[in-house]
Image (cartoon, helix red, strand yellow):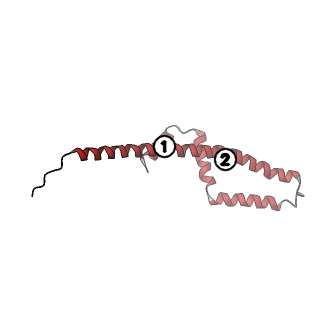
Amino acid sequence: MSQAAARIAENEAQATPLFARFARWVERQVGRSLTFLLAIAVVVLWGASGPIFGWSDTWQLVINTATTIVTFLMVFVIQNTQTRDTQAMQLNWTSLSGSMLRLVTLSLILKKCPKPMSSE
């Protein structure tokens, strides 16, 4: 685990808001292949129930309402995930730039140092 990721984990462990924990849980669950298969099953069952409900407006409204609500809620989960990813990336860039600065400084110092005399 990188230092940046460790810092983020440490900060989140100290005082993680309920929504952040819930968003991480949802993120893990939605990313599973089983969840995708469940979504396909729901759509297939909804489609198969069409003849039973006579292809009514209410039957169509059910899937439209469900997908709208899920999409609306997922916007917040996705935003939370992107915010955490951006924070982690920023910490990694900060750490990397600090390391590069130290490396360049060391290189410049070594170039200015006199070379040791060879004992030939």
Local packing at callout 2 (Cα closer than 10 Å; few below 14, some 14-19, many 20+) is: some
Compared across the picture, whether 52 is left or right of 97 comes to right
Q: Can you tell which mark lies on residue 74?
A: 2
Quadrant housing the C terminus:
bottom left
Location of residue 103 in the rendering, given as x and y in whole percent from the top left corner: 33, 47
Name the residue at 52% across, 37% down. Answer: 15
| Circle 1: residue type | Gln
Compared across the picture, whether 114 is left or right of 21 comes to left
Kindly indicate the quadrant of the structure image that contains residue 82. Answer: top right
Q: Which residue is mark 1?
A: 90
Compared across the picture, whether 116 is left or right of 103 comes to left
Location of residue 33 in the rendering, given as x and y in whole percent from the top left corner: 63, 60
| Circle 2: residue type | Met
Disc 2 and disc 1: Cα gap in Å?
24 Å
Q: Nearer the viewer, mark 2 or mark 1?
A: 1
- The residue lying toward the viewer, choosing from 83 and 59, is 83
Location of residue 102 in the rendering, given as x and y in whole percent from the top left corner: 33, 44
Location of residue 26 in the rendering, given as x and y in whole percent from the top left corner: 62, 49
Element type where label 1 sits in the image: helix
Name the residue at 37% across, 46% down. Answer: 100
Q: Earlier in the sequence, mark 2 or mark 1?
A: 2
The answer to whether the residue labelled 2 contacts the one labelled 1, judged by CB atoms less than 8 Å apart, is no
Compared across the picture, whether 91 is left or right of 16 comes to left
